[in-house]
Amino acid sequence: MRLGSAPLATTLLGLLLSTALQAAETPLVELKLVAEHPVNGMSNGHLSGLARCADEWLAVSDRDDDRLYRLQEQEGAWLAEAETFEAPPPPPSGLPWGLRMRTWAAGLVRGGDLDFEGLTCDSAGNRYLVSEAHAAVLQITPGGTADWLNLPASLIRQARASGMLLHFNALLEGIAVDPAGERLWLAAERERRGLLVLHKKNNSWRCAGSCVLLSQAGQEPSLSQPDRGISLPRDFADVSYFNEKLFTLERGAYRICRRNLADGKLEKCWSFAAEALTDARRYPVAYGMAEALWLDDKAAWIGLDNGGKARGDGENRPIIWHFAAPKGGWNAP
């Protein structure tokens, strides 16, 4: 069809805009909360990563540089038991001096120099922890040996050239790996948020062409305090790999989104805002607390890093939310 006449072009443009607006206004399917579990035994409420590895729940805190937590499932509250390890000094990050110094100073004040912000595992039992402070990934073998992955220098260069990893406390926030341990995804948190991918070949991690799958800017209104007119940067709090798809935890928007593995393109989202923003579960801050995501066939598990803050009902321990998978499953059209 030719757009030779101005009236026709205007009409088509109006139809496209109307369709886009209708799509934007379509409410997301709300996930149903099955259970919530406060966690006893973690430092100061800082639950920043969650994974189920070999039928065992593991968590990590961004305030602890030397331990994972094994989570014991119980009725009601779960119990965290520390599993310690010794991480060698992190490799050079490739981040600029000023950003490194701000991160170092923050670590001295609050604790947690390595600032672990995500956790995942492969089918061989290797655990992978992403360090936001050092833009690095620590691998812990089933035997407990900890070593930093040798990531390519081009990873940070490409990310920064795409507008990511430019701001303090807005660096790498999530990590996912495929079961074979051959593909690794990292989530840049905000300003700009994005997704990065690495491929393992001959025991070496590389960018297969570009490491950048997605880089995205923008603001969204605060859902937790909508009456204040606050807008927050669009963010990724975690990324999860499941059934050849990527799933992002979008903290400020209170949603989980499915994305194409090849380019990070958005396919579908589900909201957990209705359950998270009840008076009893609401925290007195403009931003969300969801930090960790794990998916399986039947459920989504979301970990909250509340930093010791109490929510509406007075609960101040970290929380794990158990949501039922949507009707038709996570890969449904």
Image (spheres, rainbow, N blue to C red):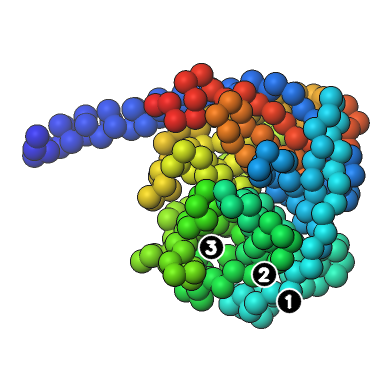
Question: Given the image, on which type of amino acid does mark 2 rest?
Answer: Asp
Q: Which residue is mark 3?
A: 164
SS at mark 1 in the image? loop
Q: Can you tell which of label 3 and label 1 is closer to the viewer?
A: 1
The structure residue drawn at horizontal position 85% and vertical position 26%, both measured from the top left corner, is 76
Furthest-front residue in view? 143
State the residue in front, 28 or 41: 41
Residue 28 appears at what percent x and percent y? 52, 25
As measured in the structure, the alpha-carbon distance from the residue carrying label 3 to the one carrying label 1 is 24 Å
Q: Which residue is mark 1?
A: 89
- Quadrant location, the C terminus: top left
In the drawing, does residue 202 fall left or right of residue 222? left
As measured in the structure, the alpha-carbon distance from the residue carrying label 3 to the one carrying label 2 is 25 Å
Label 3 CA crowd tier, 10 Å (few <14, some 14–19, many 20+): many
Q: Which residue is mark 2?
A: 147
In the drawing, does residue 64 fall left or right of residue 212? right
SS at mark 2 in the image? strand
Question: Given the image, on which type of amino acid does mark 3 rest?
Answer: Met
Residue 296 appears at what percent x and percent y? 58, 33
The structure residue drawn at horizontal position 80% and vertical position 24%, both measured from the top left corner, is 279
Q: Can you tell which of label 3 and label 2 is closer to the viewer?
A: 2
Q: Image quadrant of residue 126?
A: bottom right
